[in-house]
Image (cartoon, helix red, strand yellow):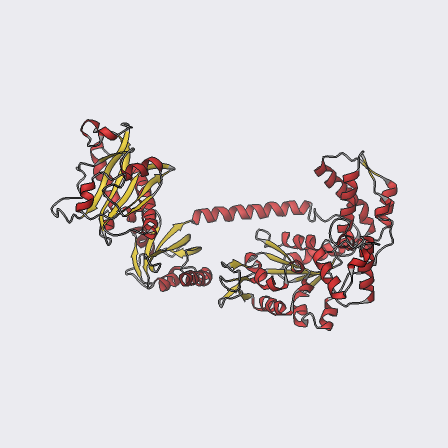
Amino acid sequence: MRGLAEQPDVALARVWLLKPSDICPRCQMRTVCADQTRCLHLAASAGTSISSPAEEWESLDHPDNRIPLSNALEGRIANMGEEILQRGLQDSTPGIVRPTWLANEKILSFAGHPLVSGGEIVGVLAIFSRGMLTEQDSAWLQIFAQLVAVAITNARAFVERQQAAEVAERHAAELKQVIDVAPMHMFIWEADGSASFGNQVARDYFRVARPMNPLKFLEMVTHPDDIGNFKTRLLQARNDEEPFDHEARMRRHDGEYRWFRYQSYPLRHADGTIARWCGIRTDIHDQKMAEERAAQETIALREEIDKASMFEEIVGASPALQAALTRVARVAATSSTVLITGETGTGKELIARAIHKRSPRASKAFIGTNCAAIPRDLIPSELFGHEKGAFTGALSRRIGRFELADGGTIFLDEMGELPLDTQIALLRVLQEREFERVGGSQSIRVDTRVIAATNRDLQASVDAGTFRSDLLYRINVFPIHVPPLRERKEDIPLLVEYFVDRFSTSMGKRITKINKRSLAQLEAYPWPGNIRELQNVVERSVIVCDGDEFSVDESWISHAALPSRPLNDSLTTQERETIETALAQAKGRVSGPTGAAAKLGIPPSTLDSKIRALKIDKRKFQSS
């Protein structure tokens, strides 16, 4: 409290503890007290009077050393559990116990916070100021109140073992040293970045002889593997004048590294400028170790499950599919870039997920990105993130998908749709493992595995000048081709059975057998949309199925087979005919379950872009 009372304009700083009432017959406020079972007991006080300099404000033997919960600003805080910031105090302000004292001491404002321990209000911390307290002052006081509450809890646990006569003395001593007994490291930086304070716990941990430049100090005590990213983000937060929250390992005086959560908050003047930075370091080492053990146990469990069912979501036993899965098993344990090729709807993303699942990165993120579904102007922002103000609408910083996938895997579906400028940035990520956010100047390093997929002939795109040859060489390290369904027709019965079971279960239906004629028709159909088209047909059939036998409406698969080759970026006559045939069958509709996109097995947005590129008039098919 003495430390608080020494702050500019602070007249009086006090701590009250919530205890049972004990002096009701002689209490000055007995007549206004509705609840005489509990009240606030003055526990610590410090300040200086200007009207009566000889008056001792540290004394606990004071007329208002008991405050009822139904009266005074302090009582309202204890009763409601809410902070109060009251400015422009006057004699008529509700909750002022001694209006005369207010005027004599020229008190203009009040700030108070509840002291909460274990979800229970244990007291109140408040200050009276001769200046106008700000929201930032109240925020700083809240941090201080949290530390006071922790100290109170620690002190109470200690004094319970002492003699009753020692309780008051011990308790007061703990409160006067509240910052130093806090279990976390607390520190303060001045606005210019110099260190001005570190509490006893921090001093004991590091045993640094004298205060030093904070950045040099961090470089000295932070683990070499953590300091680069830590320092970059800290400086960025300082430049942006934003709160900072990061985890890093820090070296104790005996050389042992422990994990800490490092937080700092800007405290501001009334004009918004930074007054100082207040920070806290919390030891999270035991928690980190427990999480790491749990992650290792999870990985071990996944490995055991994978031994029994490596590709449980990939249905089929055909030689063509097994050849692709064999290549998956070989490349999964490496960090090599993989290019998955195959027609639309063949399950390229399932293959990518299988690679990630069996890789050492399985416990980290798998971030999937459909390059064709993102507007071209937004692709760099989506992949690499952007800084606040980088472009119109960039109201805050955004983390890109490469950064989200750090340590894990990013899956770039429909890779051939990337514009050339984004291809250049992607090439840098693959070569140097670093990039810059849109509008940023700081290089960000990531350890992200790239798995790309395409239904295009990328070599043809290179020849046409729409895809970079050096990027193709970079991503085509380990190619895996996913066979179309017409090349693995022996898997169709298994797939039909799998989808029937899946959809009937979700729809609450009981289907126990599959019509042989329908199955034969499904096996004879060339499936230009591959597994995705088969899945749609089965789902639609399950919806209309009324009995226990699965069958398919012949009209859904009896039309002439569409060309089975994948669409590519060479605008050939065959591609135009493919799209026009699908539009004719869909009567000009692009999207929806019966639209041309569904028949072709590609996203509606992709089909729309191809229709525009080929200058196809889809309206002429609407009446056909």
Residue closer to the observer: 355 or 132: 132
Q: Is residue 622 above or below residue 445?
A: above
Q: Left or right of 29: which side holds 453?
A: right
Quadrant position of residue 159: top left
Rendering coords of residue 202 (x, y %): 33, 53
**Looking at the rendering, which quadrant does residue 467 occupy?**
bottom right
Can you see residue 603?
Answer: no
Residue 292: x, y in percent?
51, 49
Is residue 451 found left or right of 154 in the rendered image?
right
Residue 54 drawn above or below residue 326? above
Residue 616 is situated, as x and y percent measured from the top left of the image, at 78, 63
Relative to 380, is 33 on the left or the right? left
Residue drawn at x 59%, y 54% is 361
Callout count: 0
* Residue at the extreme left of the image, as rendered: 54
Quarter of the image for the C terminus: give it. Answer: bottom right
Residue in the image at 67% along x and 71% along y:
468
Query: Is 302 situated left or right of 6 in this image?
Result: right
Residue 72 position within the rendered picture, expressed as x and y whole percent measured from the top left: 27, 37
Query: Is residue 109 visible from the viewing direction of this image?
Result: yes
